[in-house]
Image (spheres, grey):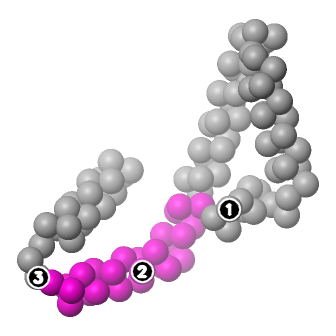
Amino acid sequence: MRYRLTFVVGLALGYVLGTKAGRERYEQLKKSARQVAQNPAVRNTAESAAQQGRQFAGKAYHAVSDKVGDRVPESVAGRVRSLRERSAHSDGSDDWGTSHR
C-alpha cells in the first residue's frame, strides 16, 4: 500500500510539474490534495503509520544499543538523552501535531 501511495504521489507531482494545463489545473489538484489530507481516514492512517514507525525505531534503538553498548560516541549519547528528555517533558505531540500515544 505504501509503495502504491508513493507511486501515486510521484505521478501527481510529475503531472503538476510537467503539465501545460496551467494555473487553473494546478489549483484544482491542490484543492483535491487538501481535501484528501483533511479526510479523517487518511489522517488516522497517517497517524497509525507514524506511531508504528516510532515503535519500530524504539525496537531498533534497543537492539542496536544492546549490541553497541559503550562504543557510541558521547556526542551521540548526549543527543539521544536530550531527545528523550524533551519528549518526556512535552505535551505528547510532535512538531506535526500528531500524538505519541
Name the element at disc 2. helix
Disc 2 crowd rating (10 Å Cα; few below 14, some 14-19, many 20+) is few
Residue carrying label 3: 21
Which of the two marks, 3 or 2, is nearer to us in this view? 3
The dominant secondary structure in magenta is helix
- Point out residue 2 in the picture as x, y percentages from the top left corner: 38, 50
Q: Secondary structure at mark 3?
A: loop
Q: Start and end of the magenta stretch?
A: 22-47
Q: Are marks 1 and 3 in contact (CB under 8 Å)?
A: no
Going from the N terminus, do you reach mark 1 or mark 3 first?
Answer: 3
Q: Residues within 10 Å of mark 1 (few under 14, many from 20)?
A: few
Residue drawn at x 84%, y 40% is 82
How many labels, in total? Answer: 3
Amino acid residing under circle 1: Asp
In the image: residue 79, left or right of residue 96: right
Q: Can residue 8 be spotted in the picture?
A: no
